[in-house]
Amino acid sequence: MPDSADPVPGSVGEPAQWLPLPDVAELLKIPVNRVHQLIRDRKLVAVRRGGFMQVPAQLIGDGVVVKHVSGVLTLLDDARFDDEEIIRWLFTADDSLPGTPAQALAENRGTEIKRRAQALGF
């Protein structure tokens, strides 16, 4: 059950599905402590939802972290986005894409997303 302060999954700026870190570890076939390391190293982003640290499911595909996620996270971090702001940016629809930046990353359109993320730092 979501915390009362948790956004509704699938709402504007919010992923439709979240994965707790043990599930991420299982999908990536790595120990959960390695998932924690991926988050610290900005290879993945996680926020607290439902009382637990969770990763947007859309950032994991075919047993790996979606290509370009790490680069986009670094650029957004450099632009001083916190983890909640990063999630909101990744999952807010942009008609000029079309879709969300996270969808574009999943569709291997990372170059455009990295360009947009880089522009946020200026």
Image (cartoon, rainbow, N blue to C red):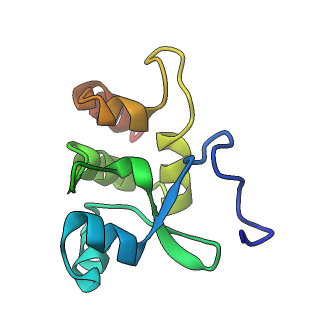
Residue 79 showing in the rendered view: no
Residue 38 screen position, x and y as percent: 25, 70
**Residue at coordinates 63% horizontally, 79% vertically from top-left?**
51
In the figure, 16 relative to 25: above or below? above
Q: Nearer the viewer, residue 121 or 83?
A: 83
Residue 92 screen position, x and y as percent: 57, 35
In the figure, 32 relative to 102: above or below? below
In which quadrant is the C terminus drawn? top left
Single out the residue that lies furthest toward the right: 4
Residue 91 screen position, x and y as percent: 52, 40
Residue 72 showing in the rendered view: yes
> Is residue 28 found left or right of 2 in the rendered image?
left
In which quadrant is the N terminus drawn? bottom right
In the figure, 46 relative to 56: above or below? below
Q: How many marks?
A: 0
In the figure, 101 relative to 51: above or below? above
> Is residue 12 found left or right of 111 in the rendered image?
right
Single out the residue that lies furthest toward the top: 96
Q: Nearer the viewer, residue 28 or 51?
A: 28
**Residue at coordinates 64% horizontally, 51% vertically from top-left?**
9
> Is residue 121 found left or right of 6 in the rendered image?
left
**Residue at coordinates 33% horizontally, 52% vertically from top-left?**
73
The quadrant where residue 25 appears: bottom left
